[in-house]
Amino acid sequence: MGKVEVAVVGAGAAGISASIEAARAGAKVVLIDENERPGGQLFKQIHKFFGSEAHRAGIRGIQIGTDLLEQAKEAGVQIRLNTVVYGLFAEKCLGLMCGDHTEELQADVIILATGASEKPLAFPGWTLPGVMGAGAAQTLINIHRTLPGGRVLMVGAGNVGLIVSYQLLQAGAEVVAIVEGLPTIGGYGVHASKIRRAGVPILLSHTVLGAEGHESVERAVISRIDKNWVPLQGTEKTLEIDTLCLAVGLSPLAELAWMAGCRFIHISPMGGWIPVHDENMQTTLPGIYVAGDLTGIEEASTAMEEGRLAGLAAAEALGCLSFEEGAMKKAEVRERLETLRIGSFGKGRSLGKKQILESRGTV
Amino acid sequence: MRVGDHPILGKAEWGKKVTLMVDGHPVEALEGEPIATALLAAGRRVFRYTTKLKEPRGVFCALGRCTDCVMVVDGQPNVRTCVTPVRDGMVIETQVGLGQWCYSKKTGEKKG
Protein backbone atom coordinates (compact mmCIF):
# COMPACT_ATOMS: atom_id res chain seq x y z
CA MET A 1 0.00 0.00 0.00
CA GLY A 2 1.29 3.44 -0.96
CA LYS A 3 1.58 6.20 1.60
CA VAL A 4 1.45 9.97 1.26
CA GLU A 5 1.03 12.95 3.55
CA VAL A 6 -1.79 14.68 1.68
CA ALA A 7 -4.06 13.10 -0.91
CA VAL A 8 -6.34 15.48 -2.79
CA VAL A 9 -9.22 13.98 -4.75
CA GLY A 10 -10.29 16.03 -7.75
CA ALA A 11 -8.01 18.31 -9.80
CA GLY A 12 -10.50 21.11 -10.38
CA ALA A 13 -10.45 24.67 -9.08
CA ALA A 14 -10.64 23.65 -5.40
CA GLY A 15 -8.37 20.60 -5.57
CA ILE A 16 -5.50 22.25 -7.40
CA SER A 17 -5.63 25.26 -5.07
CA ALA A 18 -5.58 22.99 -2.01
CA SER A 19 -2.62 21.04 -3.42
CA ILE A 20 -0.63 24.19 -4.09
CA GLU A 21 -1.03 25.53 -0.56
CA ALA A 22 -0.23 22.22 1.13
CA ALA A 23 2.80 21.58 -1.10
CA ARG A 24 4.13 25.14 -0.73
CA ALA A 25 4.03 24.64 3.04
CA GLY A 26 6.23 21.59 2.57
CA ALA A 27 3.79 18.67 2.58
CA LYS A 28 4.11 15.76 0.16
CA VAL A 29 0.96 16.01 -1.95
CA VAL A 30 -0.66 13.68 -4.45
CA LEU A 31 -3.47 15.18 -6.55
CA ILE A 32 -5.73 12.54 -8.09
CA ASP A 33 -8.21 12.93 -10.95
CA GLU A 34 -10.20 10.46 -13.00
CA ASN A 35 -9.90 12.51 -16.16
CA GLU A 36 -7.20 12.50 -18.77
CA ARG A 37 -6.61 16.20 -18.25
CA PRO A 38 -6.55 18.17 -14.99
CA GLY A 39 -8.47 21.40 -14.46
CA GLY A 40 -11.99 20.18 -13.75
CA GLN A 41 -14.47 22.61 -15.22
CA LEU A 42 -12.05 25.55 -15.37
CA PHE A 43 -10.99 24.92 -18.94
CA LYS A 44 -14.49 25.29 -20.28
CA GLN A 45 -15.00 28.65 -18.54
CA ILE A 46 -14.07 30.90 -21.43
CA HIS A 47 -15.79 33.92 -19.90
CA LYS A 48 -14.18 36.49 -17.63
CA PHE A 49 -14.53 35.98 -13.89
CA PHE A 50 -16.07 38.45 -11.45
CA GLY A 51 -14.91 39.65 -8.06
CA SER A 52 -11.97 41.82 -7.13
CA GLU A 53 -8.44 41.85 -8.48
CA ALA A 54 -7.38 39.40 -5.77
CA HIS A 55 -9.97 37.01 -7.19
CA ARG A 56 -8.56 37.47 -10.65
CA ALA A 57 -11.61 39.31 -11.93
CA GLY A 58 -11.53 39.98 -15.63
CA ILE A 59 -9.43 36.88 -16.28
CA ARG A 60 -10.95 33.95 -18.17
CA GLY A 61 -11.27 30.57 -16.47
CA ILE A 62 -9.00 28.87 -19.01
CA GLN A 63 -6.13 31.20 -18.10
CA ILE A 64 -6.72 30.70 -14.38
CA GLY A 65 -6.60 26.93 -14.89
CA THR A 66 -3.35 27.13 -16.83
CA ASP A 67 -1.74 29.33 -14.13
CA LEU A 68 -2.89 27.04 -11.31
CA LEU A 69 -1.46 23.96 -12.98
CA GLU A 70 1.84 25.74 -13.48
CA GLN A 71 1.93 26.69 -9.79
CA ALA A 72 1.08 23.13 -8.74
CA LYS A 73 4.00 21.79 -10.77
CA GLU A 74 6.35 24.39 -9.32
CA ALA A 75 5.23 23.51 -5.80
CA GLY A 76 6.07 19.85 -6.45
CA VAL A 77 2.54 18.43 -6.44
CA GLN A 78 2.41 14.94 -7.89
CA ILE A 79 -0.56 14.76 -10.27
CA ARG A 80 -2.09 11.37 -10.99
CA LEU A 81 -4.51 11.41 -13.91
CA ASN A 82 -6.77 8.68 -15.35
CA THR A 83 -7.17 7.47 -11.79
CA VAL A 84 -10.59 6.90 -10.27
CA VAL A 85 -10.95 7.01 -6.49
CA TYR A 86 -13.57 4.33 -6.01
CA GLY A 87 -13.60 4.25 -2.22
CA LEU A 88 -12.55 5.88 1.01
CA PHE A 89 -11.96 3.26 3.69
CA ALA A 90 -10.89 3.11 7.34
CA GLU A 91 -7.55 4.66 8.33
CA LYS A 92 -7.89 7.20 5.53
CA CYS A 93 -7.13 4.62 2.89
CA LEU A 94 -8.19 5.45 -0.67
CA GLY A 95 -9.04 2.79 -3.22
CA LEU A 96 -7.69 3.75 -6.63
CA MET A 97 -8.55 2.32 -10.00
CA CYS A 98 -6.06 3.07 -12.72
CA GLY A 99 -6.49 1.42 -16.11
CA ASP A 100 -7.02 -2.28 -15.49
CA HIS A 101 -5.58 -2.45 -11.97
CA THR A 102 -6.44 -1.21 -8.51
CA GLU A 103 -4.25 -0.05 -5.67
CA GLU A 104 -4.51 1.45 -2.21
CA LEU A 105 -3.14 4.75 -1.04
CA GLN A 106 -3.05 5.73 2.60
CA ALA A 107 -2.87 9.41 3.48
CA ASP A 108 -2.33 11.32 6.70
CA VAL A 109 -4.75 13.94 5.44
CA ILE A 110 -7.36 13.65 2.72
CA ILE A 111 -8.90 16.62 0.95
CA LEU A 112 -12.04 15.83 -1.03
CA ALA A 113 -12.67 18.28 -3.87
CA THR A 114 -14.90 16.17 -6.08
CA GLY A 115 -17.13 18.99 -7.27
CA ALA A 116 -20.70 18.59 -8.40
CA SER A 117 -22.81 17.12 -11.16
CA GLU A 118 -25.68 18.67 -13.07
CA LYS A 119 -29.19 18.03 -11.88
CA PRO A 120 -31.51 16.50 -14.43
CA LEU A 121 -35.11 17.56 -15.00
CA ALA A 122 -37.67 14.89 -15.83
CA PHE A 123 -40.44 15.59 -18.36
CA PRO A 124 -41.90 13.49 -21.15
CA GLY A 125 -39.14 12.99 -23.71
CA TRP A 126 -36.25 14.06 -21.45
CA THR A 127 -34.34 10.87 -22.25
CA LEU A 128 -34.29 11.56 -26.00
CA PRO A 129 -30.85 12.07 -27.53
CA GLY A 130 -30.34 15.81 -27.86
CA VAL A 131 -31.54 16.54 -24.33
CA MET A 132 -28.42 17.19 -22.28
CA GLY A 133 -26.93 19.12 -19.43
CA ALA A 134 -25.93 22.70 -20.19
CA GLY A 135 -22.50 21.82 -18.84
CA ALA A 136 -22.35 18.94 -21.30
CA ALA A 137 -22.95 21.32 -24.19
CA GLN A 138 -20.33 23.66 -22.73
CA THR A 139 -17.75 20.86 -22.59
CA LEU A 140 -18.52 19.86 -26.16
CA ILE A 141 -18.21 23.34 -27.65
CA ASN A 142 -15.44 24.92 -25.57
CA ILE A 143 -13.15 21.95 -25.03
CA HIS A 144 -13.89 19.62 -27.92
CA ARG A 145 -14.97 22.34 -30.36
CA THR A 146 -18.01 20.37 -31.48
CA LEU A 147 -21.57 21.64 -31.51
CA PRO A 148 -24.15 19.16 -30.21
CA GLY A 149 -26.78 20.77 -32.46
CA GLY A 150 -27.81 23.89 -34.29
CA ARG A 151 -31.07 25.04 -32.64
CA VAL A 152 -31.06 25.02 -28.87
CA LEU A 153 -33.63 25.58 -26.14
CA MET A 154 -32.09 26.37 -22.75
CA VAL A 155 -34.00 25.54 -19.58
CA GLY A 156 -32.91 27.70 -16.64
CA ALA A 157 -31.85 31.35 -16.42
CA GLY A 158 -29.29 31.03 -13.64
CA ASN A 159 -25.68 31.83 -14.40
CA VAL A 160 -25.02 28.46 -16.02
CA GLY A 161 -28.03 28.79 -18.35
CA LEU A 162 -27.15 32.36 -19.30
CA ILE A 163 -23.42 31.80 -19.78
CA VAL A 164 -23.75 28.56 -21.73
CA SER A 165 -26.44 30.12 -23.95
CA TYR A 166 -24.06 32.93 -24.81
CA GLN A 167 -21.23 30.49 -25.43
CA LEU A 168 -23.48 28.43 -27.70
CA LEU A 169 -24.06 31.60 -29.72
CA GLN A 170 -20.31 32.22 -29.82
CA ALA A 171 -19.82 28.69 -31.13
CA GLY A 172 -22.30 29.35 -33.93
CA ALA A 173 -25.52 27.77 -32.67
CA GLU A 174 -28.90 29.43 -32.55
CA VAL A 175 -30.51 29.66 -29.12
CA VAL A 176 -34.25 29.92 -29.70
CA ALA A 177 -35.11 30.83 -26.11
CA ILE A 178 -34.26 30.46 -22.45
CA VAL A 179 -37.17 29.32 -20.29
CA GLU A 180 -37.15 29.91 -16.56
CA GLY A 181 -39.75 28.69 -14.09
CA LEU A 182 -39.17 31.50 -11.62
CA PRO A 183 -40.60 34.95 -12.26
CA THR A 184 -37.07 36.41 -12.05
CA ILE A 185 -33.70 35.78 -13.67
CA GLY A 186 -31.42 33.89 -11.28
CA GLY A 187 -28.07 34.81 -12.83
CA TYR A 188 -26.10 38.04 -13.00
CA GLY A 189 -27.60 40.99 -14.88
CA VAL A 190 -24.46 41.32 -17.01
CA HIS A 191 -24.93 37.87 -18.49
CA ALA A 192 -28.68 38.33 -18.99
CA SER A 193 -28.13 41.63 -20.79
CA LYS A 194 -25.63 40.08 -23.18
CA ILE A 195 -28.13 37.37 -24.03
CA ARG A 196 -30.94 39.84 -24.57
CA ARG A 197 -28.76 42.09 -26.72
CA ALA A 198 -28.06 39.04 -28.86
CA GLY A 199 -31.82 38.73 -29.39
CA VAL A 200 -32.48 35.60 -27.34
CA PRO A 201 -35.80 35.83 -25.48
CA ILE A 202 -35.71 34.94 -21.77
CA LEU A 203 -39.17 33.57 -20.98
CA LEU A 204 -39.81 33.89 -17.25
CA SER A 205 -42.55 31.88 -15.48
CA HIS A 206 -42.28 29.31 -18.26
CA THR A 207 -41.47 25.63 -18.21
CA VAL A 208 -40.87 22.83 -20.66
CA LEU A 209 -43.80 20.43 -20.86
CA GLY A 210 -42.10 17.91 -23.07
CA ALA A 211 -39.61 17.05 -25.78
CA GLU A 212 -40.66 15.18 -28.89
CA GLY A 213 -38.95 13.54 -31.80
CA HIS A 214 -38.50 10.24 -33.59
CA GLU A 215 -35.00 9.16 -32.46
CA SER A 216 -33.80 12.50 -31.13
CA VAL A 217 -35.25 15.85 -30.12
CA GLU A 218 -37.10 17.65 -32.91
CA ARG A 219 -39.50 19.81 -30.91
CA ALA A 220 -40.12 21.08 -27.42
CA VAL A 221 -43.44 22.21 -25.99
CA ILE A 222 -43.23 25.03 -23.48
CA SER A 223 -45.92 26.84 -21.54
CA ARG A 224 -46.42 29.61 -19.09
CA ILE A 225 -46.87 28.59 -15.44
CA ASP A 226 -48.61 30.26 -12.54
CA LYS A 227 -46.94 31.08 -9.23
CA ASN A 228 -47.51 27.51 -8.01
CA TRP A 229 -45.68 26.19 -11.09
CA VAL A 230 -48.93 24.87 -12.62
CA PRO A 231 -48.92 25.12 -16.43
CA LEU A 232 -51.53 27.54 -17.75
CA GLN A 233 -53.71 25.91 -20.37
CA GLY A 234 -53.81 27.62 -23.71
CA THR A 235 -50.31 29.11 -23.37
CA GLU A 236 -48.51 26.12 -24.89
CA LYS A 237 -46.05 26.84 -27.67
CA THR A 238 -44.10 24.40 -29.84
CA LEU A 239 -40.50 25.22 -30.70
CA GLU A 240 -38.56 23.49 -33.48
CA ILE A 241 -35.22 22.55 -31.96
CA ASP A 242 -32.60 19.81 -32.13
CA THR A 243 -31.00 20.32 -28.72
CA LEU A 244 -32.46 20.97 -25.30
CA CYS A 245 -30.07 22.01 -22.56
CA LEU A 246 -30.85 21.71 -18.86
CA ALA A 247 -29.37 24.31 -16.53
CA VAL A 248 -31.44 23.55 -13.46
CA GLY A 249 -28.80 23.41 -10.78
CA LEU A 250 -26.02 21.22 -9.52
CA SER A 251 -25.71 18.73 -6.70
CA PRO A 252 -22.53 17.99 -4.75
CA LEU A 253 -20.64 14.80 -5.66
CA ALA A 254 -20.40 13.56 -2.11
CA GLU A 255 -20.12 9.77 -2.44
CA LEU A 256 -16.65 9.50 -0.87
CA ALA A 257 -17.65 11.64 2.10
CA TRP A 258 -20.78 9.50 2.59
CA MET A 259 -18.71 6.34 2.38
CA ALA A 260 -16.21 7.62 4.94
CA GLY A 261 -19.06 8.32 7.36
CA CYS A 262 -18.92 12.11 7.49
CA ARG A 263 -21.96 13.79 9.02
CA PHE A 264 -24.17 15.59 6.49
CA ILE A 265 -26.64 18.44 6.50
CA HIS A 266 -29.36 19.13 3.93
CA ILE A 267 -29.44 22.71 2.65
CA SER A 268 -31.57 23.09 -0.46
CA PRO A 269 -30.19 26.40 -1.75
CA MET A 270 -26.65 24.97 -1.52
CA GLY A 271 -27.53 21.96 -3.69
CA GLY A 272 -28.82 19.35 -1.22
CA TRP A 273 -26.81 17.11 1.10
CA ILE A 274 -23.51 18.63 2.13
CA PRO A 275 -20.79 17.22 4.38
CA VAL A 276 -20.67 19.25 7.59
CA HIS A 277 -17.35 21.05 8.01
CA ASP A 278 -15.70 23.54 10.33
CA GLU A 279 -14.01 26.81 9.44
CA ASN A 280 -10.86 24.88 8.50
CA MET A 281 -12.93 22.85 5.99
CA GLN A 282 -12.45 19.76 8.13
CA THR A 283 -15.40 17.34 8.16
CA THR A 284 -16.70 15.61 11.26
CA LEU A 285 -13.95 13.02 10.71
CA PRO A 286 -10.48 14.17 11.78
CA GLY A 287 -8.07 14.46 8.88
CA ILE A 288 -10.74 14.47 6.18
CA TYR A 289 -11.25 17.90 4.62
CA VAL A 290 -13.60 19.14 1.90
CA ALA A 291 -13.54 22.10 -0.50
CA GLY A 292 -15.34 23.53 -3.50
CA ASP A 293 -18.77 22.65 -4.86
CA LEU A 294 -18.86 19.49 -2.75
CA THR A 295 -19.34 21.78 0.27
CA GLY A 296 -22.26 23.64 -1.30
CA ILE A 297 -22.72 24.88 -4.84
CA GLU A 298 -21.00 28.22 -5.38
CA GLU A 299 -18.55 29.20 -8.09
CA ALA A 300 -14.94 28.74 -9.14
CA SER A 301 -13.66 31.78 -7.22
CA THR A 302 -15.01 30.52 -3.89
CA ALA A 303 -13.89 26.97 -4.75
CA MET A 304 -10.31 28.16 -5.18
CA GLU A 305 -10.36 30.04 -1.85
CA GLU A 306 -11.91 27.09 -0.01
CA GLY A 307 -9.28 24.86 -1.56
CA ARG A 308 -6.54 27.16 -0.28
CA LEU A 309 -8.11 27.13 3.17
CA ALA A 310 -8.26 23.32 3.24
CA GLY A 311 -4.69 23.08 1.94
CA LEU A 312 -3.39 25.46 4.61
CA ALA A 313 -5.33 23.69 7.36
CA ALA A 314 -4.02 20.33 6.19
CA ALA A 315 -0.43 21.61 6.20
CA GLU A 316 -0.96 23.04 9.65
CA ALA A 317 -2.37 19.76 10.94
CA LEU A 318 0.73 17.98 9.62
CA GLY A 319 3.00 20.45 11.37
CA CYS A 320 4.29 21.98 8.14
CA LEU A 321 2.99 25.39 9.19
CA SER A 322 3.33 26.92 12.64
CA PHE A 323 0.15 27.87 14.48
CA GLU A 324 0.83 31.59 13.97
CA GLU A 325 1.71 31.28 10.31
CA GLY A 326 -1.30 29.07 9.67
CA ALA A 327 -3.64 31.40 11.50
CA MET A 328 -2.40 34.41 9.57
CA LYS A 329 -2.64 32.79 6.14
CA LYS A 330 -6.05 31.28 6.84
CA ALA A 331 -7.36 34.65 8.04
CA GLU A 332 -6.35 36.20 4.70
CA VAL A 333 -8.22 33.52 2.76
CA ARG A 334 -11.30 33.80 4.98
CA GLU A 335 -11.39 37.54 4.41
CA ARG A 336 -11.32 37.05 0.64
CA LEU A 337 -14.03 34.39 0.91
CA GLU A 338 -16.23 36.80 2.81
CA THR A 339 -15.96 39.43 0.11
CA LEU A 340 -17.04 36.82 -2.44
CA ARG A 341 -20.19 36.16 -0.44
CA ILE A 342 -21.60 39.66 -0.14
CA GLY A 343 -24.37 41.43 -2.03
CA SER A 344 -27.74 40.09 -3.10
CA PHE A 345 -26.20 37.12 -4.92
CA GLY A 346 -23.79 36.13 -2.16
CA LYS A 347 -26.18 36.51 0.75
CA GLY A 348 -27.94 33.17 0.35
CA ARG A 349 -24.62 31.33 0.04
CA SER A 350 -23.24 33.17 3.04
CA LEU A 351 -26.25 32.08 5.10
CA GLY A 352 -25.94 28.51 3.85
CA LYS A 353 -22.29 28.40 4.81
CA LYS A 354 -23.10 29.78 8.26
CA GLN A 355 -25.68 27.04 8.69
CA ILE A 356 -23.05 24.40 7.84
CA LEU A 357 -20.54 25.81 10.32
CA GLU A 358 -23.15 26.11 13.06
CA SER A 359 -24.33 22.54 12.57
CA ARG A 360 -20.76 21.42 13.18
CA GLY A 361 -21.21 22.09 16.87
CA THR A 362 -24.48 20.20 17.25
CA VAL A 363 -24.90 16.44 17.30
CA MET B 1 -20.64 20.44 -36.53
CA ARG B 2 -17.10 21.49 -35.68
CA VAL B 3 -16.35 24.93 -34.26
CA GLY B 4 -13.37 25.96 -36.39
CA ASP B 5 -13.29 29.71 -35.76
CA HIS B 6 -14.20 31.06 -32.36
CA PRO B 7 -14.35 34.69 -31.19
CA ILE B 8 -12.59 33.87 -27.89
CA LEU B 9 -10.73 30.64 -28.48
CA GLY B 10 -9.49 31.55 -31.95
CA LYS B 11 -8.84 29.08 -34.72
CA ALA B 12 -8.99 25.43 -33.72
CA GLU B 13 -5.82 23.37 -33.85
CA TRP B 14 -7.24 20.07 -34.96
CA GLY B 15 -5.54 16.80 -34.11
CA LYS B 16 -4.41 14.34 -36.77
CA LYS B 17 -7.23 12.63 -38.65
CA VAL B 18 -7.96 9.03 -37.74
CA THR B 19 -10.68 6.66 -38.88
CA LEU B 20 -13.18 4.78 -36.72
CA MET B 21 -15.37 1.92 -37.92
CA VAL B 22 -18.83 2.72 -36.58
CA ASP B 23 -21.46 0.02 -37.16
CA GLY B 24 -19.44 -1.04 -40.16
CA HIS B 25 -19.01 2.43 -41.69
CA PRO B 26 -15.86 4.57 -41.59
CA VAL B 27 -16.16 7.79 -39.57
CA GLU B 28 -13.48 10.45 -39.43
CA ALA B 29 -12.24 11.49 -36.00
CA LEU B 30 -9.53 13.76 -34.62
CA GLU B 31 -6.71 12.36 -32.55
CA GLY B 32 -7.10 13.13 -28.86
CA GLU B 33 -10.84 13.72 -28.87
CA PRO B 34 -13.39 11.46 -27.18
CA ILE B 35 -15.38 9.03 -29.32
CA ALA B 36 -18.61 10.91 -28.56
CA THR B 37 -17.55 14.19 -30.16
CA ALA B 38 -16.40 12.43 -33.32
CA LEU B 39 -19.82 10.80 -33.58
CA LEU B 40 -21.70 14.04 -32.85
CA ALA B 41 -19.59 15.83 -35.46
CA ALA B 42 -20.51 13.12 -37.92
CA GLY B 43 -24.18 13.83 -37.20
CA ARG B 44 -24.98 10.84 -35.03
CA ARG B 45 -27.34 11.34 -32.08
CA VAL B 46 -28.25 7.77 -31.02
CA PHE B 47 -25.48 5.89 -29.21
CA ARG B 48 -27.40 3.01 -27.70
CA TYR B 49 -30.86 1.51 -27.13
CA THR B 50 -32.21 0.63 -23.68
CA THR B 51 -32.61 -2.96 -22.49
CA LYS B 52 -36.37 -3.27 -22.08
CA LEU B 53 -38.06 -0.60 -24.15
CA LYS B 54 -35.31 -0.24 -26.78
CA GLU B 55 -35.46 3.53 -26.44
CA PRO B 56 -32.66 5.61 -27.99
CA ARG B 57 -30.10 7.32 -25.78
CA GLY B 58 -27.28 9.72 -26.55
CA VAL B 59 -24.84 12.10 -24.89
CA PHE B 60 -26.29 13.55 -21.68
CA CYS B 61 -23.55 14.70 -19.29
CA ALA B 62 -20.42 14.54 -21.51
CA LEU B 63 -18.45 14.12 -18.31
CA GLY B 64 -18.32 10.37 -17.72
CA ARG B 65 -20.93 10.32 -14.98
CA CYS B 66 -24.31 9.39 -16.44
CA THR B 67 -23.31 6.43 -18.69
CA ASP B 68 -26.04 7.29 -21.19
CA CYS B 69 -23.54 7.36 -24.07
CA VAL B 70 -22.03 3.89 -23.61
CA MET B 71 -21.29 1.79 -26.69
CA VAL B 72 -19.50 -1.41 -27.61
CA VAL B 73 -15.90 -0.42 -28.32
CA ASP B 74 -13.43 -2.94 -29.69
CA GLY B 75 -15.68 -5.70 -28.46
CA GLN B 76 -16.11 -4.32 -24.97
CA PRO B 77 -19.61 -3.14 -23.98
CA ASN B 78 -20.46 -0.23 -21.65
CA VAL B 79 -17.58 1.98 -22.71
CA ARG B 80 -18.27 5.64 -21.85
CA THR B 81 -17.73 7.26 -25.22
CA CYS B 82 -17.66 10.82 -23.82
CA VAL B 83 -14.44 10.17 -21.88
CA THR B 84 -12.77 7.53 -24.03
CA PRO B 85 -10.29 8.93 -26.56
CA VAL B 86 -10.42 7.73 -30.16
CA ARG B 87 -7.75 5.53 -31.68
CA ASP B 88 -7.20 4.86 -35.36
CA GLY B 89 -9.04 1.74 -36.45
CA MET B 90 -11.28 1.57 -33.37
CA VAL B 91 -14.36 -0.59 -33.92
CA ILE B 92 -17.48 0.97 -32.43
CA GLU B 93 -20.96 -0.47 -32.34
CA THR B 94 -24.31 0.86 -31.20
CA GLN B 95 -25.05 -0.88 -27.93
CA VAL B 96 -28.38 -2.63 -27.46
CA GLY B 97 -29.33 -3.28 -23.86
CA LEU B 98 -26.36 -4.35 -21.80
CA GLY B 99 -24.33 -5.17 -24.88
CA GLN B 100 -22.35 -8.30 -25.48
CA TRP B 101 -18.73 -9.13 -24.92
CA CYS B 102 -17.24 -10.11 -28.26
CA TYR B 103 -14.23 -11.66 -26.59
CA SER B 104 -14.12 -14.57 -24.18
CA LYS B 105 -13.09 -13.37 -20.75
CA LYS B 106 -11.34 -16.67 -20.12
CA THR B 107 -9.26 -17.06 -23.26
CA GLY B 108 -9.30 -13.59 -24.80
CA GLU B 109 -10.38 -15.23 -28.07
CA LYS B 110 -13.01 -13.62 -30.26
CA LYS B 111 -16.41 -15.25 -29.82
CA GLY B 112 -18.48 -16.70 -32.68
Image (spheres, coloured by chain):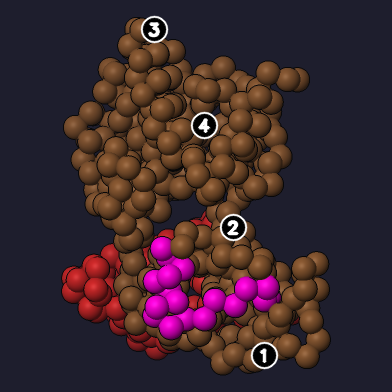
Chain colours: A brown, B red
In the image, A205: left or right of A246?
Answer: right
Quadrant of the image containing the N terminus of chain A: top left
Q: Earlier in the sequence, mark 3 or mark 4?
A: 4
User: Residue placed at 28% from the left, 17% from the top?
Assistant: A26
User: Residue placed at 78% from the left, 78% from the top?
Assistant: A231
Residue for badge 2: A249
Residue for badge 1: A237
Whether A290 is drawn above or below A323: the answer is below
State whether discs 4 and 2 lie on one chain. Answer: yes
The amino acid at mark 1 is Lys
The amino acid at mark 3 is Phe
Kindly state the secondary structure of the residue where label 2 is placed: loop
Residue A140 rendering spot, x and y as whole percentages: 40, 69
User: Residue placed at 73% from the left, 20% from the top?
Assistant: A362
In the image, B89: left or right of A226?
Answer: left
Range covered by the magenta-colored residues: A190-207
In the image, A71: left or right of A314?
Answer: left
| Gap between marks 2 and 3 measured at Cα | 39 Å
Quadrant of the image containing the C terminus of chain A: top right
The answer, for residue A179, to whether it is visible in the render is yes
Residue for badge 4: A290
| Gap between marks 2 and 1 measured at Cα | 24 Å
State whether discs 4 and 1 lie on one chain. Answer: yes
State whether discs 1 and 3 lie on one chain. Answer: yes
